[in-house]
Amino acid sequence: MGYQDHHTRRYIRSSMAEEVLDAETETALATAWRDRRDEAALHRLITAYKRLAVSFAGRFRRYDVPYDDLIQQGNLGLMRAAEKFDPENGARFSTYAAWWIRASMQDYVMRNWSLVRTGTNANQKKLFFHLRRVMQRHAGDADREEPLSTRVARELQVPEDQVELMMGRMTGADLSLDAPQSGDDDGGRSWVEALEDETPGTEISVLGRMENDRRRRALYSAVAGLPERERRIVAARHLSDAPTTLSELGMAMGISKERVRQLEERALARLTTTVRASEPETAAMT
């Protein structure tokens, strides 16, 4: 891993040697950046807390992601913290920045840990980062009749089905669909050949297109049979790529917005009745 890289080690040493800011200096620098966009103040604030990014990166190395990348993600979180920090809320910048650094690294780990998207909600993120630790704590409870997934779900306060799903994901590696189903690389079909083709058959596709065309013709025929004002309103409100508002139609037609709404409702009711009336006849024809 990049943790042994010479440049990385030098960066770590320089980060840990940076000045330690007191609360008053933090507030002054954050205020200068917020109010005057003082880049020198921002640089000093960020530089002083690069050590936080380095520290948190060490905690995430067990997820087998590049150490250099973790530090970079931590620095991005640090910059977001500096941008959003309110120096008047009474909190230390270091405390505020730690949350953003951790969150940035967690998102990076979950994006890169597997090809399958993991951790799309709060429960899944909690499971991803705490599941192994909780499972190890309960692994010795051999005399417990209660399933492990049940105990983990109760401790982490997440649904048991999500625990079981995450346990399955974290115990198996990504598998290429091109890999053979058997251990023999020369024979047998690949996993991708076992996937069911969910594409509709030709007959279903053709019948679907015919049905859509029939409904479209029935709709436009019903619209053509509306009175002129109602036809104009339906076309402008429902058959246009850029629908017109009630107010705009009212001004163009010289009537109130409320009157346009009434005419629209009456037109839509007529269309519904006409199209429904055509269904049995058309169905019998087909």
Image (cartoon, rainbow, N blue to C red):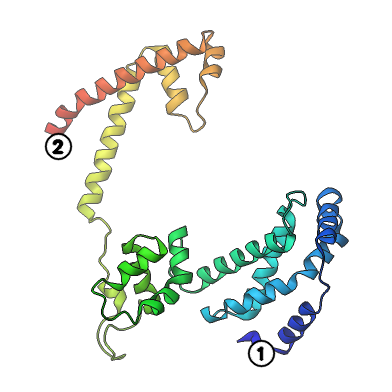
Q: Name the mark on residue 212.
A: none
Position of 29 relative to 227 (above/below): below
Q: Which residue position is annotated with label 2?
A: 286
Viewer-nearest residue: 186 or 83:
83
**At numbered mark 2, what does the secondary structure look like: helix, strand or loop?**
loop
Which amino acid type is marked by label 1?
Gln
191, 170: nearer the viewer = 170
- In this rendering, is residue 79 above or below 133? above
- The x, y position of residue 180, in whole percent, is 30, 84
Residue at 28% across, 39% down: 212
Q: Position of residue 157 (x, y in %)?
A: 40, 60
Cα distance between the residues tagged 2 and 1: 73 Å
The reply, left or right, for residue 87 in relation to residue 56 is right
Q: Position of residue 224 (x, y in %)?
A: 35, 20
> Where's the C terminus, which quadrant?
top left
Q: Which residue is found at the position 63% from the left and 76% from the top?
A: 57
Question: In which image quadrant can residue 56 be found?
Answer: bottom right
The mark nearer the N terminus, 2 or 1, is: 1
- Given the current orientation, which residue lies at the most extreme left position? 284
Q: Which residue is mark 1?
A: 4
Circle 1: element type: helix
Q: Within the image, what quadrant is residue 65 found in?
A: bottom right
